[in-house]
Image: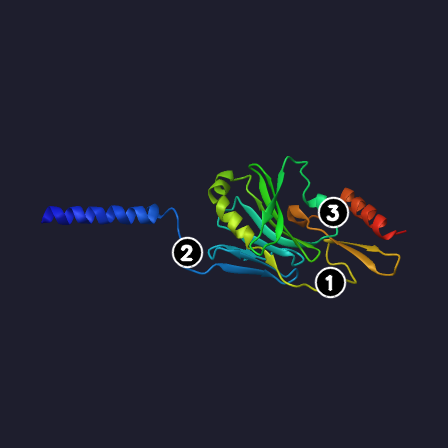
Amino acid sequence: MLKQKILIAILLFILSFAITGCGEVKTSTEPDAEVHNARFNFWLTIPSEWKASDRSVNGDGYFIECGNENIDMRVYGSYAVLPQDYYLNTDDGSVVADFLFDGGIVGWQKQKADTYIQFFYYSNARYITFHLNYQNDPVWFNENEEKINLIAKTLRDGYIEPFQTTSFELSNYLVFPHNGGRENVIHLFLDDEYRSIDEYPDLISYCKNELAEANAIK
């Protein structure tokens, strides 16, 4: 009888060990967190143990903290004033493919091996970008790639009023005159701790040329 009890206890321990998986995979009992950006009116669902912090200078999005300081993850919106090729350029060796979001919107996934992955959601003349740079810890990304894709699929938007402005907003805008009396506003997401727009002369020149062709700016 004693041997039977010991055998049963061992079997129960083994079964429990198999179910919990040594604690390597944790399933949170807390609901997922809904991240909402008011400026561009987009939503993203992230695990409840992750954090979204607004450290931008203009309220365009959030930094997503997953508990790994080697991972740079963020989600942000921008107005679609530049051509699609600007966002989906593959000169750095990246690869672009279609990506289906949960809401049925077909966007794009852009990835450079062992470096970064981006998801682009386009709607209402805006690009919403979910960006993840994992070059400092590619192993983490390989282990969490499925989770990242599931999170990216939750990216979605709501209705947004047409964008209007009458002034500059810090350094992330270029404002050019229009010969019809209104302004052309270009919103730019500046990486590298939000360097000044003046440090991107080629981009400024490109924007001016594009607007000149579209609006005949003099």
Which residue corresponds to the image point at 51% horizontal and 46% vertical from the top-left? 69
* Residue depicted at x 23% and y 49%: 12
Question: Between tags 3 and 2, which lies in front?
Answer: 3
Residue 65 appearing in the image: no
- Residue 78 to residue 136: above or below: below
Q: Nearer the viewer, mark 2 or mark 1?
A: 1
Q: Are marks 1 and 3 in contact (CB under 8 Å)?
A: no
Amino acid type of the residue tagged 1 in the rendering? Pro
Which percent across, then down, holds residue 29?
40, 59
Q: Amino acid at mark 2?
A: Ser
Cα separation, mark 3 vs mark 2, equals 41 Å
Which type of secondary structure does the marked residue at label 2 adopt? loop
Circle 1 — which element? loop
**Above or below — where is 93 with respect to 28?**
above
Please provide percent x and percent y for residue 62. Answer: 59, 55
Quadrant in the picture for residue 182: bottom right
Q: Amino acid at mark 3?
A: Pro
Q: Who comes first in sequence, dot 2 or dot 1?
A: 2
Whether residues under marks 2 and 1 lie with C-beta atoms below 8 angstroms apart, the answer is no
Dot 1: within a 10 Å radius of its alpha carbon, few (fewer than 14), some, or many (20 or more) residues?
A: few
Instruction: Give the camera-side residue of 75 and 196.
Output: 75
Q: Which residue is mark 3?
A: 83
Q: CA distance from mark 1 to mark 3?
A: 19 Å
Left or right: 34 in relation to 218: left
Point out residue 111 in the picture as x, y percentages from the top left corner.
59, 40
| Residue at the extreme left of the image, as rendered | 1
Of pointers 3 and 2, the one earlier in the residue sequence: 2
Q: Disc 1 marks which residue?
A: 162
Mark 3 secondary-structure assignment: loop
Label 2, on which residue? 28
